[in-house]
Image (spheres, rainbow, N blue to C red):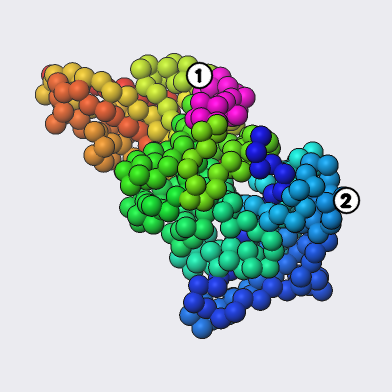
Amino acid sequence: MRGITAFVFVVVCCVTQLGFAQDAITGYGNGEANPQTPGYHNMVYHYTDEGKPYQLSFLLYLPQGYGTTAATRPTTLPATQALAPYPMLVFMSGLGERGSDPQMLRSSGVSHDLAERPEIQKWLPMIMVGPQCPADARYEDARIGKAITGLIDEITRRYPVDAQRRYVTGFSMGGTACWSVARFAKERLAVVAPIVARVFEPEVLSAALAGTGSTCLVISGEVDAKSEPGSSVMVKALRGRGVDVVYAMVPKGDHNLWSWYYRDKRFYEWLLLHRQGSPKPVDRLGEAALIEMARDRSNVNSRYLAKISKDLQEVAPWWQIDGCRVGGDQGLKKELFGKTNVFVSLLSYQEFPCRLQTTTTLPTSAKVTLHLVVGRHPEGDWRLVVRVNEQEVFAGPIDKATTPDLWKSVDVDLSAWSGQEVRLQLCHYALKQMKNAQANWETIQIQTNP
């Protein structure tokens, strides 16, 4: 396996040098400003954007044997590479790690696995600059994307970085940040590797990466409403511009896929095979092998979703569910708030719905109605949206004002589609907050009148 020896891992905070004033790095608190000893260091990056000063915290990790001679480096590092530059990995964490305390970055992702799994430190020595997005910003913001690109340049200047082996990865919001950074860091990155990321300016990104020699590794989950179908859109746009793309869409994969990759040695080996501007490696793992890394997670999800789908058939035969939370107390309830045989759905995200859907041919009748009896949690609320062939035909809250007795009948007129094959969707959205925003489905029926 090539290139696994010296690895600089840079988990990057938000900084910039693109046309701004000279950047500065200081220690967090009274920490050292230019650490050279192995281990973790809490740091602060100072930069200026449009004349306004900013500072962002980040976590710096220098690998075992960093700065030593060939004779004293770990045995995983060949003596011939004692003075060789290190590859760099830029890693962005998720929404929950935003703030100004770099210790928060050790709770998830690569920085967590690096801290908690000593075996990773042994076979993958790396410099890690651990980025922390500010609490009042998002990684997708143009200022942040430019800032991270500036930090890539600054770290390359300060440390022995191999400019042909710089990689960027991240999960969730940090995955979307990979696309944001790629707008500005073109021709710097060997691999852009977002995991469960949102769709983000596909035409802009594909144009930015076209002809740069960069490779994109896109990992998404089939049942993750945040990353699908957005990742498919990104892949199509990139391939349309001739960008080298490897696309691992995990069957029955949900949003929690990143831990299966960041703990796996093969993920890093795959990155390290790539050099910016060089032909794609002929011996790299293909999409099937990359999907296999998350097989255990996929199998757990598949069994759970099969159970939930079976439960739904008891209330609504031939209907399917997607976008629901994988896990939690949902499914068929024999009795719930005075009703029997109730199906409960739970949300995964504030902004994305859980959907009950079917494709069916409606009866030919003068009056066709979709009859629903839906309910809410006593301390929660949600929003119901009904769509016919993607057209919204009903939307309304299921809350304390509209549903004081916890249950509500809703009748949606489908007469305009009488006798036609249609796709029906019942969308369960959060109304105000995620807490207790469960949807209770007692009746889902298509009714006719002469």
Instruction: Kindly indicate the quadrant of the structure image that contains residue 32.
Output: bottom right
Instruction: Kindly indicate the quadrant of the structure image that contains residue 416.
Output: top left
Figure quadrant of the N terminus: top right
Is residue 295 part of the magenta span, yes or no?
yes
Q: Which residue is drawn at 47% across and 43% down?
A: 279
Measured along the vertical axis of the image, is residue 257 above or below residue 361? below
Report the magenta residues as a range.
Answer: 285-305
Residue 21, position as x, y percentages in the image: 56, 81
Q: Residue furthest front?
A: 80
Q: Which residue is drawn at 58% across and 66% down?
A: 153
Q: In this view, does 320 lie to the left or right of 266?
A: left
Of residues 378 and 417, the one drawn nearer to the viewer in this rendering: 417
Residue 6, position as x, y percentages in the image: 72, 48
Of residues 375 and 282, the one drawn nearer to the viewer in this rendering: 282
Q: Is mark 2 on a helix, strand or loop?
A: loop
Q: Which residue is drawn at 82% across and 74% down?
A: 30
Give the mark nearer the N terminus: 1 vs 2.
Answer: 2
Does the CB distance between marks 1 and 2 fall below 8 Å?
Answer: no
Per the image, the residue denoted by label 2 is 72
Q: Residue 196 carries which label?
A: none
Q: In this view, does 413 lie to the left or right of 122?
A: left
- What residue type is disc 2 on? Thr
| Secondary structure character of the magenta stretch overall | helix
Q: Which mark is residue 306?
A: 1
Measured along the vertical axis of the image, is residue 400 above or below residue 183? above
Measured along the vertical axis of the image, is residue 155 above or below residue 410? below
Does any portion of residue 322 appear in the rendered image? yes
Residue 334, position as x, y percentages in the image: 53, 19
Measured along the vertical axis of the image, is residue 128 above or below residue 376? below
Q: In this view, does 444 lie to the left or right of 223?
A: left
